Image (cartoon, rainbow, N blue to C red):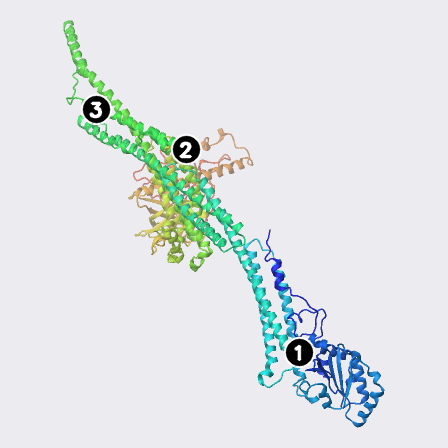
Amino acid sequence: MAEKATSRGPARRFWSLPRKRRGAPGRHKPDEIMHQDIVPLCAADIQEQLKKRFAYLSGGRGQDGSPVITFPDYPAFSEIPDKEFQNVMTYLTSIPSLQDAGIGFILVIDRRQDRWTSVKASVLRIAASFPANLQLVLVLRPTGFFQRTLSDIAFKFNRDDFKMKVPVMMLSSVPELHGYIDKSQLTEDLGGTLDYCHSRWLCHRTAIESFALMVKQTAQMLQTFGTELAETELPNDVQSTSLVLSVHTEKKAKAKEDLQLALKEGNGILESLREPLAESTSHSVNQDQLDNQATVQRLLAQLNETEAAFDEFWAKHQQKLEQCLQLRHFEQGFREVKTTLDSMSQKIAAFTDVGNSLAHVQHLLKDLSSFEEKSSVAVDRARALSLEGQQLIENKHYAVDSIHPKCEELQHLCDHFATEITRRRGLLSKSLELHSLLEMSMKWCDEGIFLLASQPVDKCQSQDGAEAALQEIEKFLETGAENKIQELNKIYKEYECILNQDLLEHVQKVFQKQESTEEMFHRRQASLKKLAAKQTRPVQPVAPRPEALTKSPSPSPGSWRSSESSSSEGSALRRGPYRRAKSEMSESRQGRTSSTGDEEESLAILRRHVMNELLDTERAYVEELLCVLEGYAAEMDNPLMAHLISTGLQNKKSILFGNMEEIYHFHNRIFLRDLESCIDCPELVGRCFLERMEEFQIYEKYCQNKPRSESLWRQCSDCPFFQECQKKLDHKLSLDSYLLKPVQRITKYQLLLKEMLKYSKNCEGAEDLQEALSSILGILKAVNDSMHLIAITGYDGNLSDLGKLLMQGSFSVWTDHKKGHTKVKELARFKPMQRHLFLHEKAVLFCKKREENGEGYEKAPSYSYKQSLNMTAVGITENVKGDAKKFEIWYNAREEVYIIQAPTPEIKAAWVNEIRKVLTSQLQACREASQHRALEQSHSLPLPAPSSTSPTKGGNSRNVKKLEDRKTDPLSLEGYVSSSSLPKPPEKGKGWSKTSHSLEAPEEDGGWSSAEELINSSDAEEDGGLGPGKLVPGKYTVVMDDEKEGPDTLAMRTGDMVEVVEEGAEGLW
C-alpha cells in the first residue's frame, strides 16, 4: 500500500496560525491583518471617496492619546451621499489600534468659512452616523460677524439639538483649538506643525493593505500546498516517484518565488515609509506613521517566519520523497537482478552435461567460462546493489525493514551462484581429466593398431624381421604404463561424481578396446616369438615331380616291386619335411587371417579419425558463423553502434552477409545433429549428405552474392564499425576472412568424403559415400557454373528460360557458314576466335571472355554475349579429321557450322556426350509428340488397306537405329514435327532462325514412316566404317555436298531435293 508523504501533525504546526477578532492594524500580534472575523474596507475600495478629503486622519493625538479626525472646510459636505460618508467614517475609525480607538476619537470640524445652517447640519450628520466612540467634538464656527453671532444665539437656544454622548465645543478661533489639542498634533491649516500630505497618506495606506493581502494570499497558497504534500501517497514505481518529486519541486520553487516577491514588496513599502525621516532627521513622525511602519515590519517578520517554517517542512518532505525514489530504484534493481540471477541459476542447474569427448569437455569449459564472464556483470551489479542498500540503511532510511532482507537475499544469491559455478567447474575439470585419460588410452590403442598394421607379414617370416617386429612391440608395450587405464574400479571410484550412463559405457568400451588391443599384441608376440625361434635352414621338399612318373615306360613285375620299395622309402624320407612345410603353411594362413582382422581394425580407426575431423570442423564452423552473425550482423542493428557505421554501409547488411543466417540455421539445427548421429558408424555418414542435398543448394545463393559482398567490403573495410566489432570479439582476422568460411566449407566436404570413401571400400555405406561425393561435386560444379553465369553481360532475355546450365568452358572456334541459296562459302578464319560456351538444355550460348583488373572477385572475368543457337535446330559431328580435340556444331541443316576445339580430348568427349544427351531427349520428345498426333489422326481418317496389298509391307514396323549408332550421312532425315513447337529464346546477333526446314515424310497406307525420327547427329569416321541404316523411300533434303566420284554416281549439292525410290542390299540407293 502506498505511504503518505508527510504526517499531518507537523504540517499543521507549519501553516495553522491562531485567530483573533479583526481590529485596526495597530500595535498587535502579526495575525491581526491576516485573520479577521469581519472583512474590512480597504483604501483601494473607497479610494475615490477618500480623495475628496471631506474627512481625514492626520495622525495627530489628543492629550490622552485620542486619535484626531479632522473635517476640513468642504462646501459640498451636504451633498456627500450617506453611503460614501459612512464608508469613509468606518474606514478612518478602523485604522487606529484597538487601544487608541477605545479611548475615543476627537473630532475637529472646521467650519470657519461656512454658514451656521451648514454647521448645524454637519454636526448633526456626523453625530448621527459616527461608527466609533467619541471623546470630544471641537467645532470651529464661522468667522463672519453675522454668522458667528447667529451661531452663538442659535447654539444657546438649540443646545438640546446638540445633546450627544460627548461634549460639543464651539470654538471661535484656532488659538482656542490649541487649548484642547497641542499644535504639534494639528495640521498646518489648523495652525499646527504636523506634517501631513493626504495623497501620500492615501498611497501608503493602499500599499500597506495590498501588501497585507499579498501576505494573506501567500499564506493561503502555502497552506494549500502543504495540504497537498501531506496527503500525497508515495508511488510504487520509479517513474511515478520521479514525476511526483519533479512536480512538487516545481511547485515549491513557484511558492518560494511568490514568497520572495512578497518580501520584496514589503521591504519596498517599509523603505517608502522611512523615506521622510531619512531625508531630514528633524522631521517628526506622527503616531499613525509609526503604526504603519510597525505593521509592515510585523508582516515582513511573519513572512520570514513562514518561509523558515515552510523550508523546514519542505526539507523533510523532499527528504522523504528522495528516500522513496532511492527505495524504488533499489526495489526495481533488486527485481531485475533477482530475475537475472534466478535465470542464471536455472541455466547453471540445467547445465548438467559433462561431455562425451575431450573436445566436447573443452568446449563446455569454454562455454562455462564465457557464461561466467557474461554473468559477472549481473553478479557485480547485485553486489553493488547490496552495498547501495547497506548505505541506505546507514543513512537512516525510513524503509530499513524492507531494504535489509533484500540485501541479505542478494548476497545469498551471489554466493550461491559462485558456489554453483565452482562446483560445475570442478565437475568439468574431473570430466576433462577422465576424458584426457580415455583419449590417451584410445590414442595408445590406435597407435598400437597402426604399429601392428604397419608391420608387413612377409618380412616377419624371417628370423631377423620377426625379432625386429618383436622388439618394436615390446618397446611400444612399455609405454602403456602411463597411457592406458590400469584399474577400472579405481576409475569408477575416483570419477563417481560425473559417471553417467553414457560416460560409463564409454569408459567400458575404451577399456574393452584396450584389452582387445593388448590381446592383439599378445597374439602377435606369440606368433613372432615362434617365427624368431625357427631354424634358419631352408626346407627343400624332395618328392619327385608327378610328370616324371607318367613319362617313364612300364616296368617289369620285378622292377615294379623294386619301384614300390624305393617309392615307399622315398615317401618315408619325404614325410617329415612335408609335414613341417604344411605346419608352416597353416601358421602362415593363420597369420594372414590375423593380419586381415588387424587391417579391418586399422581402417575402422582411420574412419573414426575422419569422422572426428568432420565433427570437430563442423562444430567450429557453426560457432564461427554464430560469432559473425552476433558480433557483426546483429550489431549493425544496434542503435549504440549506429554512429560508427558509414553511410555507404547503411542498410547493406543483406549484401554484406548474404544468406549466412540461413546457412547457420541449417548447419546448427539440422546437419550437425545428423553428423553426430553417425559418430558410432562413420561409414554411414554418406546418407546424411544425400538426405540433405537439396538444402545444400543454399550455398549457390551465397556464392552468387559473394562478388557484391567482396566489393562492399573493399569500399568499407576501414569503417570504425568493423574495427570496434573485431576488437570486441578479440578476432585476429578481419571480417572478410570469416565471410569466406562458407565457400571454404562447401569445398572441404568433398575432401573429407574422399578420405572416408578411401577407408570404407568394403563397408555397408560405400555406395552412399560414392553417391554423396558425386552429389557434392555436382553442387560445387553448379556453384562454379552459376558464378560464371551471373557474369554474362549483354543478353536481353532471361537466362532461366534456357533451362538448366549443363556445361560451360572456353574453346577455340572456327566458323564455316553458307548463306541461304547463294551457297557462298565464307572465308574461314585462319586464326580461331576464343569463345566461352554455355550449354543449356534449350540453347548453347557463345560469349567472349573479358578479363577484369582488380583483386579477389573483381578479378573474375565477365562474359560478353555474342550469339546463341537453339538446340532444336542443332546437330553435331563428333570427329573432325586431323584433330582429336575438335568437333562440329552445325545449325539449320549446316547453314552455319562451328568447328570447336577443346583444350583436351577428355573435355571434348564430355561436351559431345552432354550434347548427345540433349539431342536424344529432344528426339524422344518429338517421337512422343508424333505418335500422339498420329493417334489422333487415326481416329479421324478411314481405315488403311490390308497389309497384303501395301507395296511397302512391313515398312511401318521398321525402326531406325538409335542416335548413338548413326554415322555421317549426306541426308538429314527430318520428320513432320516442326522445331517451332519447342520454346525459342530471343534473337540477338546471329540469333536462332525461325524458319523450319523440315519436309513431309512419305505417307503410305494412311500411317507414318520410320523417318519421323529427327536425326541431328552424325559421326564422320576418318577410316570409313559401317554404313547407315536403310532409308525409307521418300523425299529428302541434301544437307552436305557430295562430289561426283565416277560415271555411275550422282553429284549433289546442299539444299537439293532428292527422292529415294529404293535402297539396295549394299547400301546403294
Residue bearing mark 3: 529
Q: Is residue 566 above or below residue 761?
A: above
Q: Nearer the viewer, mark 3 or mark 1?
A: 1
Mark drawn on residue 983: none
Query: How far is mark 2 from mark 1, CA to CA?
Result: 100 Å
Query: Mark 2 and mark 3 in contact (Cβ < 8 Å)?
Result: no
Residue bearing mark 2: 500
Q: Secondary structure at mark 3?
A: helix
Dot 1, how many residues are within 10 Å of its Cα: few (below 14), some (14-19), or many (20+)?
some
**Sequence-wise first label, 2 or 1:** 1
Q: Nearer the viewer, mark 2 or mark 1?
A: 1
Q: Position of residue 308 (x, y in %)?
A: 57, 66
Mark drawn on residue 205: 1
Q: Secondary structure at mark 2?
A: loop
Callout count:
3
Query: Mark 1 and mark 2 in contact (Cβ < 8 Å)?
Result: no
Q: Is residue 317 above or below residue 928?
A: below
Name the foreground residue: 352 vs 656: 352
Dot 3, how many residues are within 10 Å of its Cα: few (below 14), some (14-19), or many (20+)?
some
Q: Is 374 positioned to the left or the right of 59 in the image?
A: left
Q: Position of residue 602 (x, y in %)?
A: 30, 31
Q: Is residue 891 visible?
A: no
Name the foreground residue: 473 vs 315: 315
Q: Position of residue 831 (x, y in %)?
A: 30, 52
- Which image quadrant is residue 970 in? top left
Q: Secondary structure at mark 1?
A: helix
